[in-house]
Amino acid sequence: MRVVIADDDTLIREGLSALLTAEGCDVVAAVAHPDDLSAAVASHRPDVAVVDVRMPPTHTDEGIRAAVRVRRFAHPPAVLILSAHAEQSFATELLTAGAAGIGYLLKERVGRVEEFVDALRRVAGGGTAIDPEVVSRLLARRQAADAVAGLTAREREVLALMAEGLGNMALARRLGISDNAVQKHIRRIFAKLGLPPNDDVDRRVVAVLRHLEALGR
């Protein structure tokens, strides 16, 4: 299995190279910049590229963007993304480019060598390996979107204004309805979002969070 590694952290890059070499992989290139990943893939045609999410120059999503680019090559490699945190938006962006031969793991999984190498081989073989923590967050986001989708147009309007921080009286003025009507809408929103009365939870805050998750913010 021919592998290209892209990570700007020298220790991680060299550590991965040593680990994969010890496991019988052929590490054909190890680069520190996303632009060098494209060149390495074009030159070596690896079976799989192991790529860090956050790379120069801004250390935000350059790794994801570089991975998406090489997946569009005439001879694209499988891609295994490594991230220090579970960032579902990045996973979603990568998966839209096609799910076959895609992996997204937290860096902490690398320490579990057997699991990591198994995931890498699975991805290189055209399979998928998504970190359980990322999956749980994607499911939570989907569930939030489904719940909010069940609200009426007026209820979504009320929830959106709640997200802006408006209290009941301000909501009533903005919508031109009575305070009693606002309270009824909010009760229905809580019911549809599955938020029963709970002394330990501010239901308005939870409802707003569901709204924001559904919007993908």
Image (cartoon, helix red, strand yellow):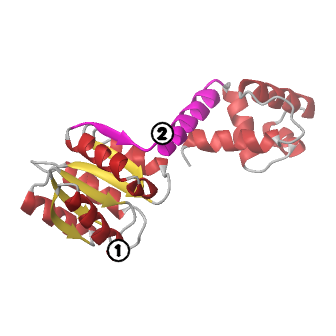
N-term-proximal mark, 1 vs 2: 1
Residue in the image at 27% along x and 59% along y: 66
- Residue 27 lies within the magenta run: no
Residue 144 painted magenta: yes
Q: Amino acid at mark 1?
A: Leu
Quadrant position of residue 65: bottom left
- In the picture of the structure, the residue carrying the numbered disc 2 is 135
Counting from the top left corner in percent of width and height, residue 213 is at 60, 42
Question: Could you tell me which residue is drawn at 67 percent across and 26 percent down?
Answer: 151
**Res 124 → quadrant:** top left
Q: Using the rendered image of the protein, determine whether residue 9 is visible from the camera's viewpoint.
A: no
Predominant SS along the magenta part: helix
Q: Count the marks: how many?
A: 2
Residue drawn at the location 29% of the way across and 49% of the way down: 117
Identify whether 169 is placed above or below 182: below
Label 1 Cα neighbours within 10 Å, binned few <14 / some 14-19 / many ≥20: few
Amino acid type for the residue under numbered disc 2: Val
Name the residue nearer the viewer: 199 or 170: 199
| Residue 17 seen in the figure | yes
Q: x, y percentage for residue 81?
A: 34, 53
Question: What element does badge 1 sit on?
Answer: helix
- Residue 127 position in % (x across, y down): 26, 36
Over which residues does the magenta segment extend? 126-150
Asked if residue 23 lies left or right of residue 190, the reply is: left
CA separation, marks 1 and 2? 28 Å
Left or right, 4 with respect to 156, comes to: left
Q: Which residue is identified by label 1? A: 11
Q: Quadrant of residue 171?
A: top right
SS at circle 2: helix
- Which sits in the foreground, 102 or 107? 107
Nearest the viewer among 114 and 99 is: 114
Q: Position of residue 11 (x, y in %)?
A: 35, 74
